[in-house]
Amino acid sequence: MTSVSRPPGALPRVVPAGALADVPADRFLALLEAVTMILTLPGRAATRVDALVVPTGQGEDWRLTDAIRAWEADRALRHLLVASTNPAERTYRPLTLDRLRALGLRRVDGVVLQAEPAGDTGQQARWILDRVRELGIGSLALVVSPYHLVRVYLTVLRAADDAGLRVPMVPLPVAVAPHAPVPEAGACGYDLVAGEVSRLLRYPDEGWIATPERLRAYLRWLWTEHGALLAGPGPDPLSASR
């Protein structure tokens, strides 16, 4: 897999809207397109995937509790993958089964935890894809807080593309109020959007996340080859456009 280095100097989590004032309109339009097309993939498809995948971070236990609730409710799910996070975070805690049990986990068969810390989303993505190959996972749902979900999706997609791997992925936004303070940052989801936007605009050029062109190609493949996963049994959702 291609090794990509994060740009020097960590970008701030909270940035003023004015920092984005000089971004060309076409870049913003491409970003809005990506956000729309990813977040409107059918959420019900998460009930038909092989695995739930949780990239943890920012002290957001709600990512875990939401995933555990879905895992315990759906015995057809074969795997629950939980990626670790950056040990430099103030709210960092090692991943253990005991920690997950305290959050409601009862069914441990199929649960896989990343043993080592992950310094960034790219390391999480590489670990996720290694488990996809190792376990023969045919489809997955990414369980992440809404403000962060598009970047996670594009990071995993870029890592998969670089590894020559294609796997159906659907987003499963965590049910959390947008005004809820994020433990690590102390800011809420609303406040963190601009920081995510700054990363989403910068990282494609750095090879860190999928470009708009890669996303379009992937979504065409996803809808064409896995329409039944997305829309459920029934007529081909693309048939009317052919």
Image (cartoon, helix red, strand yellow):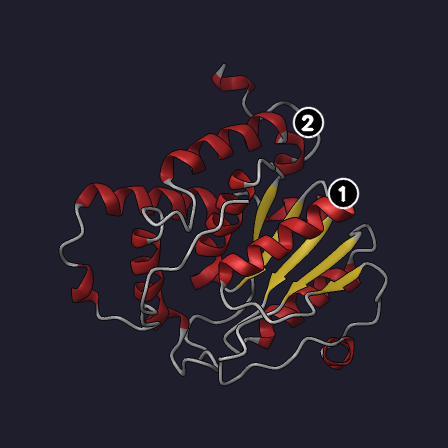
* Residue 219 is at least partly visible in this image: yes
Q: Is residue 71 left or right of residue 152?
A: right
161 relative to 194, above or below? above
Whole-angstrom CA distance, mark 1 to mark 2, is 26 Å
Q: Amino acid at mark 2?
A: Gly
* Residue corresponding to mark 1: 136
Of callouts 1 and 2, the N-terminal one: 1
Q: Are marks 1 and 2 in contact (CB under 8 Å)?
A: no
Q: Which of the 4 image quarters holds residue 52?
A: bottom right
Residue depicted at 73% across the width and 59% down the height: 80
Q: Position of residue 203 (x, y in %)?
A: 35, 52
Observer-side mark, 1 or 2, equals 1
Task: Give residue 177's position: percent from left, percent from top.
Answer: 48, 72
Residue type at tag 1 = Gly
For the residue pair 88 and 222, the one nearer the viewer reads as 88
Secondary structure at badge 2 equals loop
Name of the residue lying farthest toward the left: 22
Element class at badge 1: loop
In which quadrant is the N terminus drawn? top right
Which residue was labeled with disc 2?
Answer: 234
Tell me what residue is drawn at x 41 percent, y 80 percent: 185
Where is residue 32 drawn, in percent x and y? Answer: 32, 47
Q: Residues within 10 Å of mark 2 (few under 14, many from 20)?
A: few
The residue sitting at 71% across, 40% down in the picture is 138
From this view, report whether residue 183 is shown above or below residue 107.
below
Q: Is residue 192 left or right of residue 16?
A: right
Few, some or many residues within 10 Å of mark 1 (<14, 14–19, 20+): few
